[in-house]
């Protein structure tokens, strides 16, 4: 058997290179080893037939050299040996694993020597890999893993021994993270072997579960997650069938620690919460600042101050979420009552949003401590919402009975901290999960409570797409605390009052366009992250598809449709078309199908929807018994447009459109056709192609033709108006219009009928009391054609 050239080069470099220079060429040596996997994994029996083969000699020479370097006194040689061992066991398979017993013992010895931390960390990685590979071979487990694993865990715990209170860490946090990750993987694979060391692991890593600023060391987020994962997985080491009980015991203990922490940091308020599980609040500790924790084995490190207490509480809540993010050895019983009791207690306390919002506070606590509590409450509430997210991810459909309570808690805290982007993003993700599970079954009261969340979702989407100007910080300070969203942006430049005694900015008196543009470019604009935008965009279609549309207010539905159109959200626009809105009077909301077809003309899903969408029993154009009148559309879409017109005092139609077309309005600015059978390509044709189609959009024409269409419905109307109209167009292809001369007089008459459409709406209203105009002629022409159609249909019948 011919030896691979990489193996020859590897053996030659190990012999020729000085030991001190080996760490420098370790990447090259490892690359050679990874290419020699076939030669290293050849079974021993196959090699025995040809003992003098070159491959057998080189493999034996490589192993001997690795053993020599690992057992030597040079730290550089031990580092290079560990690197090579890790590469050999990755590609060598069972043949290399069965010869790795000496490597295991020597690397455990390296952990106890004064070698650099880089060498020890690499030893931990290599040992973890070997123990994980041994799991597939019971014989090797009995011969190698069981005898050496306890000594490995003891050596690791000795390295990460927690410091005394008030002293810094002995090793870097990254090294502790590596040890925690290694132990968390081995606990699942060897629970019986590691059972005697479970208590020592818990005591060594307990200080990293919920650290605070009172500690004299910084704990990175990765280390917190690794330690929490390990402590949760320690339930695997329970004897016999006690894994589920150990899991529940640890969960309840963490909930109790959360309550004890809340007792201290919430001492500034008088809570209205009453425990549903029998927990009794403990008296707050006397002292200038709240404090907690202790030095015993069952307690967490001590802390002092509201900020430190909030960090401890947030860490414990994240620790509870970790219980749902990791697997369990056996089925467990989750104490949901205690969990929701804790969440309800925390979310009932919110910061006051204004002078009229009174919160019962403890008069014995100073104002500074209360202000510090209001500042940390949003972070605590975000941790509670993330705990609910972990609960829903794990329990899925089993959390449906709790959905209403979770939504109530989410709405309460998100409304109180709606100015914080992280809070809004977390609320979007949680609402997405809940609506996907039980959205269609939510009661009307719960849907009404989601109105502020719907407004903030649409506002964030419009901000991210550039259709809404960022709010002015001065306007944000003057915003009312009722949770409403500003629908329009005022661009009027107001000069400051020169008579005020307070110091004013002199640049504020400059009202030129250049000054305004430069000032707006320099003003701090809210930056919405990509994850925030993604959460809001994914939630928008669910408001249309997973909420009972009959429970939504008309202005909210108009806001959702407008946001879907402006943001070009295909899923949201399709959801709007598939879930039409019907008000309490039985009238259907205008469909946005023309916008979908225009925006996605090549999409197959849109084509299927356009071709097969059948209207409901309400009639042809979203109304009851025919077309919907313009005043009905104004009520549904515009959202109290008439009141806005009175407040504006007779502004132009364009101004009205902008007012109603804001965040909370309808579609006055982007005028939408009332689904005049525009689902097909004919609706997108220019107006000059069919002059009579343009006439139908007139308010007078729609009113005049309503009676004729009602008479037609009485005679018998086909089930699908789209199909009826398409058949009529097919039969009339190539024929001249009925009762219309094709000469110049008819062309002039048609041209006169089309012209009034270009006139402003206000001018049309002013001409209603005057002489007959061209619009009257258009009405007469349209009514004549409708009567002729009815007569021909009657003859055919």
Image (cartoon, rainbow, N blue to C red):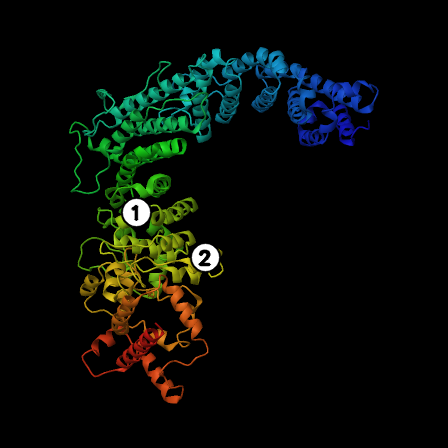
Q: Is residue 536 left or right of residue 481?
A: right
Where residue 98 sits: x, y (%)?
Answer: 67, 17
For label 1, count other residues whose C-alpha is less than 10 Å away and answer few (under 14), some (14-19) or many (20+).
some
Q: What residue is disc 2 on?
A: 608
In the rendered image, the vertical position of residue 323 relative to residue 616, given as above or below: above
- Residue 275 seen in this snapshot: yes
Q: Which of 641/780 is in front?
A: 780
Q: Identify the disc placed on residue 548.
A: 1
Q: Which residue ends up furthest to the bottom in the rendered image?
A: 744
Q: Which of 389/572 is in front?
A: 572
> Looking at the rendering, in which quadrant would you find the C terminus?
bottom left
Q: Which of 679/461 is in front?
A: 679
Where residue 454 sits: x, y (%)?
Answer: 31, 48
In the rendered image, the vertical position of residue 419 relative to residue 652, given as above or below: above
Disc 2 versus disc 1: nearer the observer: 2
Nearer the N terminus, badge 2 or badge 1?
1
Where residue 10 sits: x, y (%)?
Answer: 75, 28
For label 2, count other residues whose C-alpha is less than 10 Å away and answer few (under 14), some (14-19) or many (20+).
few
> Looking at the rendering, in which quadrant would you find the N terminus?
top right
Q: Is residue 391 left or right of residue 478?
A: right
> In terms of secondary structure, where does tag 2 sit?
helix
Q: Quadrant of residue 651?
A: bottom left
Q: Identify the disc placed on residue 489.
A: none
Q: Quadrant of residue 294?
A: top left
Q: Quadrant of residue 406?
A: top left
Where residue 202 sits: x, y (%)?
Answer: 43, 17
> What residue is rendered at 49% in x and 19% in y?
160
In the rendered image, the vertical position of residue 680 relative to residue 557, given as above or below: below
> In terms of secondary structure, where does tag 1 sit?
loop
């Amino acid at each position: 058997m011919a030896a691979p050239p990489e193996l020859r080069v590897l053996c030659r470099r190990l012999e020729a290179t000085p030991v001190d220079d080996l760490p420098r060429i370790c990447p090259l040596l490892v690359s050679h080893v990874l290419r020699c996997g076939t030669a290293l994994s050849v079974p021993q029996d196959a090699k025995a037939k040809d003992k003098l083969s070159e491959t057998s000699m080189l493999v034996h020479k490589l192993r001997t050299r690795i053993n020599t370097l690992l057992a030597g006194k040079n730290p550089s040689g031990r580092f290079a040996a560990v690197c090579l061992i890790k590469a050999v066991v990755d590609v060598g398979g069972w043949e290399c694993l069965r010869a790795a017993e000496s490597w295991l013992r020597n690397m455990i010895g390296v952990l106890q020597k004064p070698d650099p931390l880089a060498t020890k960390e690499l030893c931990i990685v290599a040992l973890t890999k070997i123990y994980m590979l041994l799991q597939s071979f019971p014989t090797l487990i009995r011969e190698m893993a069981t005898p050496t694993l306890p000594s490995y865990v003891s050596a690791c715990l000795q390295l990460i021994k927690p410091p005394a209170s008030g002293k810094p860490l002995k090793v870097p946090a990254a090294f502790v993270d590596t040890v925690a990750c290694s132990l968390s993987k081995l606990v699942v694979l060897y629970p019986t072997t590691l059972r005697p060391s479970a208590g020592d692991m818990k005591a060594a890593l307990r200080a990293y579960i919920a650290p605070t600023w009172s500690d004299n060391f910084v704990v990175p987020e990765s280390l917190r997650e690794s330690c929490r994962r390990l402590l949760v997985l320690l339930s695997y080491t329970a004897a016999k069938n006690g894994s589920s009980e150990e899991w529940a015991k640890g969960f309840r203990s963490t909930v109790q620690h959360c309550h004890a922490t809340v007792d201290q940091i919430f001492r500034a308020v008088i809570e209205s919460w009453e425990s549903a599980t029998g927990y009794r609040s403990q008296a707050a500790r006397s002292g200038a600042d709240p404090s907690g924790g202790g030095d015993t084995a069952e307690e967490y490190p001590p802390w002092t101050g509201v900020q430190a207490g909030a960090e401890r509480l947030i860490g414990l809540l994240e620790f509870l979420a970790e219980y749902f993010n990791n697997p369990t050895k056996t089925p467990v019983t989750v104490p949901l009552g205690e969990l929701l009791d804790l969440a309800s207690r925390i979310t009932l306390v919110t910061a006051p949003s204004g002078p009229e919002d009174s919160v019962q506070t403890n008069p014995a606590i100073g104002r500074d401590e209360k202000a510090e509590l209001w500042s940390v409450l949003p972070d605590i509430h975000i941790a509670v919402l993330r705990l609910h997210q972990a609960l829903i991810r794990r329990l899925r459909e089993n959390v449906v009975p709790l959905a209403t309570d979770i939504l109530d808690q989410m709405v309460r805290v998100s409304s109180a901290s709606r100015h914080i982007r992280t809070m809004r993003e977390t609320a979007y993700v949680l609402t997405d999960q809940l609506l996907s599970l039980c959205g269609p079954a939510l009661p009307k009261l719960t849907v009404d409570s989601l109105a502020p969340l719907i407004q903030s979702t649409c506002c964030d989407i419009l901000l991210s797409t550039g259709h809404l100007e960022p709010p002015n910080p001065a306007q944000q300070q003057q915003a009312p605390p009722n949770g409403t969203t500003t629908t329009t942006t005022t661009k009027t430049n107001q000069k400051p009052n020169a008579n005020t005694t307070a110091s004013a900015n002199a640049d504020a008196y400059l009202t030129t366009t250049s000054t305004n543009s430069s000032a707006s470019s320099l003003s701090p604009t809210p930056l919405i992250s990509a994850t925030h935008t993604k959460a809001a965009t994914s939630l928008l279609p669910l408001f249309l598809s997973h909420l009972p549309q009959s429970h939504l207010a008309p202005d909210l539905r108009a806001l959702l449709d407008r946001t879907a159109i402006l943001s070009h959200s295909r899923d949201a626009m399709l959801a709007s078309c598939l879930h039409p809105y019907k008000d309490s009077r039985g009238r259907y909301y205008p469909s946005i199908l023309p916008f979908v077809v225009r925006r996605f003309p090549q999409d197959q899903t849109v084509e299927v929807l356009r071709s097969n969408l059948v209207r409901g029993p309400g009639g042809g154009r979203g109304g009851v018994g025919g077309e919907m009148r313009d005043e009905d559309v104004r009520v549904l879409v515009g959202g109290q447009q008439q009141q806005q017109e009175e407040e504006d005092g007779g502004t132009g139609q364009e101004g009205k459109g902008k007012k109603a077309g804001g965040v909370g309005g309808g579609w006055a600015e982007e005028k939408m056709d009332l689904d005049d059978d525009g689902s097909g390509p004919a609706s997108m044709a220019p107006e000059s192609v069919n002059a009579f189609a343009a006439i139908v959009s007139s308010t007078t024409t729609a009113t005049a033709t309503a009676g004729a269409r009602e008479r037609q419905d009485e005679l018998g109307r086909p089930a699908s108006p789209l199909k009826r109209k398409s058949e009529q167009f097919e039969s009339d292809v190539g024929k001249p219009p009925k009762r219309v001369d094709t000469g110049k007089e008819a062309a002039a008459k048609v041209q006169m009928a089309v012209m009034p459409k270009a006139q402003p709406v206000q001018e049309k209203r002013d001409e209603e009391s005057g002489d007959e105009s061209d619009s009257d002629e258009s009405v007469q022409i349209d009514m004549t054609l409708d009567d002729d159609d009815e007569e021909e249909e009657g003859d055919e019948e």
